[in-house]
Image (cartoon, helix red, strand yellow):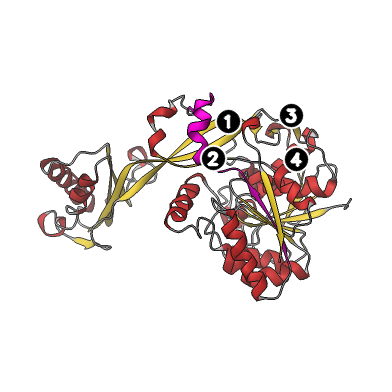
Amino acid sequence: MKSSIRIASGQGFWGDLPSAPVAQVRKGPIDYLVMDYLAEVTMSIMQKQKQRDPRTGYARDLVPLLAEILPDLVSRKITLITNGGGVNPFACRDAVMEVARSKGIRVTIGVVLGDDILERLDEMVAAGTSFDNMETGARFGAIRNSINSANVYFGAMPIVEALRLGTNIVITGRTTDTGLTLAPMIHEFGWNDHDWHRLAAGTVAGHILECGAQASGGNFSADWRSVPDLAHIGFPIAEAYPDGRFIVTKHEGTGGLVSEATVKEQLLYEIGDPCNYITPDCVADFTSIQLRQCGADRVEVEGIQGRASTEYYKVSMAYHAGYTAFGSLTYAWPDALEKARTADAIIRTRLADGGATFDEIRTEFLGYNSCFGPRLCPAYEPEEVVLRIGVRTQRKDSIEIFSREIAPLVLTGPPSVTGFAGGRPKGNDVIAYWPALIRKSLVRPQVDVVSS
């Protein structure tokens, strides 16, 4: 058993800072690099990509990244764990394997499968699984025919199995963000699947790392001016120990800040009930967490309590819920706000006259009330206001009507339009989120391992 391991966050979302994983690998010692690519709507986007081209459906940014850092990973004996496999982990693995072969590098890649249950939904409903919305109680039948992705949130254990099989890259589909970090702790320290307090500690470590630099000074609301060199911000690292303690830190010489305050802000991110942070691996009690600044850019985390996991997996589904479009015009002083409001009234009248129907029309006046609403609006007259109007509807023809009504306002509405760009607004599919539960006994994760 190792006395400690260093697990580095490489990114917090698909599209995060591209230099971050490179810096994590090259600027100091780490044992694991974890890369989180997935969000709820991301799975639906990937599913659409795969339907158009069966070779896609994964985070393609991963491939050029590995073309750059794979030699470093191998020479420094760093294991990569990522959920970038999306809805097509095999295709992702094949693309990564091609990179390894092109560089003459031997790698062993583990793929975690079994989370995609889209083709099994009817079978499972017939067998008694309701898939009703776990947050609202809404019935699944109302949106069944609109579902385009359905993925089970697996936890750390399938990744642990892949690590035990000797992999140095693990690619998964829909895995909990926390599981990416918890898995190497279980593997290296020999924790069992009922060691609830330690599993909870690893889960909390994963929660801190999952949003990338948000734990090391990025998006820091308490005192953002105190964060040095944001341009070269260092992403967080969890220095983990067998007893469940860990220290949040970053590489020396990088920008950013790791303090009790930055870590606390990340701990509060999307936790729901702090006493019951539910994952497939355990239930963590965030109220038991104890933090201590133990050095420059070093925060020790300990005392975490955990309880047994539930008998359910969470299922993340996405479904088509109509169409939306947005348009904008910029009005200049004098009377910029009055002009924008008048233009808003004009376009709403013209939309109604044209027979368009909408579930929602939403208007914002950027520079005046778009962030905080009317109660906190400034008392002064703004020098410029951006009218931004959006519509949502079940009818595609209503989107077409809306798209034709923005540009005419330039010459048929109030004066001083100083900004109109992008042409006619384009309609986009609305992808809605549907969370549900499924018994763990109905889904079995699978691990497939190959070597180059």
Q: Indicate which disc residue 117 carries.
A: 2
Q: Which label sits in the foreground, 3 or 1?
A: 1
Q: Indicate which disc residue 307 carries.
A: 3
Magenta-colored span: 107-132
Query: Residue, x 58% and y 46% (percent of image)?
Result: 174
Residue 217, percent from left and from top: 62, 55
Q: Which of the image's four quarters has the C terminus?
A: bottom right
Q: Secondary structure at mark 2?
A: loop
Write down the residue under mark 4.
201
Query: Does residue 130 appear to the left or right of 26 in the view shown?
Result: left
Residue 311 sits above or below residue 353 on the image? above
Write down the residue under mark 1.
438
The answer for how far apart the CA atoms under marks 2 and 1 are is: 11 Å
Q: Nearer the viewer, residue 90 or 345?
A: 90
Residue 25, percent from left and from top: 70, 66
The mark nearer the N terminus, 2 or 4, is 2
The answer for how far apart the CA atoms under marks 3 and 4 are is: 11 Å
